[in-house]
Image: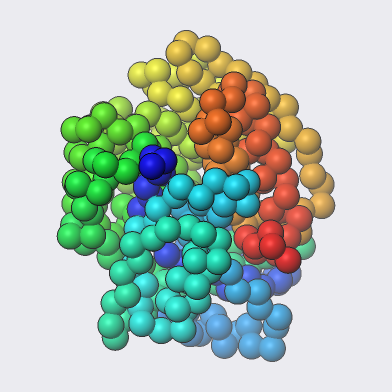
Amino acid sequence: MNKKIIGVGNAITDLLVHVDDNFITDNKLIKSSMNLISLNEHKSLSKLLEGKDITVACGGSLANSFKSLSYLGFFDSYFIGSVGDDIYGKMYLDNLNKMEIQSNLIVNKNKNSGVSIILVTPDGERTMCTYLGIAPIIKEEYINETYIKDNAKFIFIEGYLWDNKDTINTIMKLLYIAKKYDIKVIFSLSDQFCVQRHQKHFQQIVSEYVGILFANDTEFRALYDIDPNKKLSIDMQINNILTIITKDKEGVFVMHKKEISHIETEINNNPVDNTGAGDFFAGGFLYGLQRKYDIITCAEYGHNMAKRIIKKLGTDLSN
C-alpha cells in the first residue's frame, strides 16, 4: 500500500467571473486579496454579477494542490474537509471523485457550503470574496489517528484554516499526531493577510512542526517582518526546513540545509487567470519530491503546472 499525502483544507466552490478594475474599486476591494464575507454580502455581490458568465470549479488552496498532483498522475492524496448538504457540496464531492482524490468529506445537514466569488481582472489578477460557510468547521472527530499513522507519508495543512478558532484545536491535534509518528508536515501560508492575522501562531507552527513550507515572497516576508527590499538570503533559513518561495518574475527560491537555489522561470505577460497558480505550483513541486527528483527539477514541475493553470479560467485543466 502506498503512503498518502493527507491534507486538511477548506472545501470551497469557486465562482469565477471577469470584471474590470473599476468593479474592484467601486466595491472597495483590495485587488489580488482574499476577503472573508458574510452570507448577506455574498448574496449582494452575486446580485451585482447577474448576467455575467460564471465558471464553476472545485477549489480551495489544498484541493487545488491535490488537483495538480492528480493531473500529473499522482492519486495517493486524501482530502479532509466539510461541505453543506446543498448543490455546491454535491458538486464538490463529484469533482473530487472525478479527479480520483480520496476524501473524508463531511456533509453537514442544513448548512451552507463554502463559496468563493473570484473576480478576475483583465491582467489575470484575482480578487477573492469568500463566504466560508461550513468549510472551516473541521472537528477533532474527523481526525482518525490510526488511519493517519498507518497511511500518511505527509500531512498537508493550509494557513486559511486558522480563520476559525475551533478548527485550530483540530489542526493542533493533527500536528501532535504528525510529531508523534514522525510524519513530515507540509504547510502553505495561503495569503499575506492570513499571515498577518495569525503571524505569531504561524511562526510557532513553522518552528515546531513544519518540514516543508510553501509561500510566495509577500507571505514569507509578512511571516517574519522582512523588509520587502531585502534580498532573500540563506540567513533567512528556518531550522533547515525545506522552504519554497515563489517570487513572480524573479522565479523561485528554495532554501534548504544552508543552501539557497534560485530557479528562473518563464514570464507569462498575458495570463488568463492567476487563480490557483501557487497551489498548482505546490502540487507540481510535491510530485517531483515524491519521485525523488532534485530540487531544481521539482521546481520546474511546479512552474510547469502553474504555467498551465494561468492559461485557463478556473482550476480545471481537463477541458
Pick the front one: 285 or 127: 285
Task: List x then y, in percent, for residue 145.
Answer: 19, 47
Task: List x then y, in percent, for residue 76.
Answer: 46, 47
Residue 51 visible in this rendered orientation of the protein: yes
In the picture, the quarter occupied by the N terminus is top left
What residue lies at 31% left-to-right and 69% top-to-bottom? 106
Q: Is residue 148 above or below residue 166?
A: above
Quadrant of residue 178 within the rendered picture: top left
In the picture, the quarter occupied by the C terminus is bottom right
Q: Is residue 89 above or below residue 319?
A: below
Outermost residue on the top side: it is 258
Pick the front one: 288 or 65: 288
What residue lies at 60% left-to-right and 40% top-to-bottom? 284
Query: Please, which colouring scheme is shown?
Result: rainbow
Residue 35 is left or right of residue 239, and the answer is right
What residue lies at 62% left-to-right and 57% top-to-bottom? 275
Task: List x then y, in percent, for residue 32.
Answer: 60, 56
Q: How many marks?
A: 0
Residue 8 is left or right of residue 34, and the answer is left
What residue lies at 20% left-to-right and 40% top-to-bottom? 177
Task: List x then y, in percent, for residue 198.
Answer: 32, 46
